[in-house]
Each structure stands twice: as C-alpha cells, then as structure tokens.
Image (cartoon, rainbow, N blue to C red):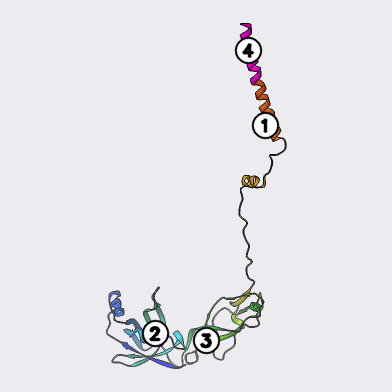
Amino acid sequence: MSEVSLRAQTGRTVGSRESRRIRRTGQVPAVVYGTGVESLPISVNALELQKVLHTEAGANALINLEIEGGDTILTMARVIQRHPFRSEYRHIDFVTVSLDETVTAEVTIDFVGTPVGVLEGGVFSPRRTSVQIEVLITNIPSSIELDVSEIEVGGSLRIADMQEIEGVTYLEDPEGVVMSVTVPAAEIEEEPEIDEEELELLEGEEAPEGEGDEDAEAQAEGEGESEDTEESGASRRRSS
C-alpha cells in the first residue's frame, strides 16, 4: 500500500469554541496518539484531508503526518467524525502505526458479475458492502472481489464463501450472509371496501321474501282499524 503525506499544525487549544474557530478557517481539528507519542492536539487542512481520504485506499490510507516544527509520523485515520448533513469532516483521530504491524481494517466488498437469478427475474439483495479483516498494515487491500454470477434465485453467499487471500483473516461470522437473490414480492391489489347497504342499492336487490308482504298487511290492518273507528263514531252520532 502506498503512503500519502499530510501537513499538520500544532498549537491549538482543546474545546468546542476553538474547534469552531478552526473550522471557519478551513482547518479540521484533530489529535494524534499511539505508541511512543503523547496525545497531541493538531489541525489539518480540510481540502488536503479530503484528498488523502479519497485515494484508492480510502479510510485505510497510510498517512505520513508532517507535524509542524517536528517529526513525520506514520499514522492511520481511525476515528473520523463527519457533519450529519454536509460533506465535511468535524474531527479526526490519527493513530501511529508500524509497517510490520498487523491491524484491523474494514474493506469494501466489490461484487463481480450479474447473478443468474437476476437474469431469471430475481432481485439482487446485498446484505453488507464491507467486511472486517485482520492483515499486515502494508497488505491492506483496497477492496475484496466476490463473484456472484452463479447465484440462482433463493441462493446466497456468506463470509465463508469469500475468496482466500494470503495474510488476510476475516473477522466476521463465517455464516454471516453477504448477499442473496430473492424472489420479487408479488404485487397484490387490494379490493376497495364497499358498504353492504350500498352494494344492495348498486345491485338493485329486492327486499327479502316476506318482508314486503308483512308491511302491506300491517298497512291494511291500520286502514281497517281507522274505518271501524269512523263507523263507530257515526253510529254513536245517529243513536244520539
């Protein structure tokens, strides 16, 4: 892995107010620590830091930190704080490293090929895009390829299926799923709910058998009672 250089200024004081002031000047507050080095507050140029962390090695880049008025220290960026909304760095922790040291690194997974299952209508579903490995610091790969071309619908690949690389130890669960090809979810159209009374009106249903007759009989009985009452009243008037 190639090394990159980054200039670092010293003399900054620790605190949120000072950190805000530093950011307004185009710098990023940082700290460097590790074996043989006392914790040292520093600041680095934001644009230079952006370039350093966007090489092929990414966040695993070996950085020669050129300390203002001091030595050059080989480091790696280990704690990177970013702004939640803007593409800018808020704070960086640089840790000293040695070229003969074994380190833990997170490396991007590079999916290669188009799964057979996708060609047959399945859906490619990556479960993770990076993997934790342990490796000699000078041998950190920029990415690890994973051939997915032979995976059918319902199939998957796990950490145990990733290629063996000399000097690289995978630190993830061997049974952890990396990717799969799934069956596309069926699109089910929901039928609109229709009120039963509204449905009866739409379909022009007749009243249940017997209900109409009962209503008619009740109406006839009522009319008969009314006539009897009138006749009785007339009889009483004649009698008087």
Q: What element carries label 4?
A: helix
Callouts 1 and 2 close, C-beta under 8 Å: no
Which quadrant of the figure has residue 67? Answer: bottom left
Q: Residue at x 45, y 86 (%)?
A: 58
Marks 4 and 2, the one that precedes in the sequence = 2
- Give coordinates of residue 104: x percent, y percent: 48, 84
Would residue 37 be counted in the magenta stretch? no
Q: In which quarter of the image is residue 22?
A: bottom left
Badge 4 crowding class, 10 Å Cα cut-off, few under 14, some 14 to 19, many 20 or more, is few
Q: Give the residue number, with chain letter if any, for mark 1.
A: 215
Residue at which label 2 appears = 50
Callout 1 touching callout 3 (CB < 8 Å): no
Rendered view: 122 above or below 6: above
Q: Which amino acid does label 2 sit on?
A: Gln
Image disc number at residue 234? 4
In the rendered structure, which amino acid carries the disc numbered 1? Asp
Q: Nearer the viewer, mark 4 or mark 3?
A: 4
Helix or strand or loop: what does disc 2 sit on?
Answer: helix
Q: Nearer the viewer, residue 65 or 146?
A: 146
Q: How far apart, in angstroms, are the residues tagged by discs 4 and 1?
A: 29 Å
Quadrant position of the C terminus in the picture? top right
Q: Earlier in the sequence, mark 4 or mark 3?
A: 3
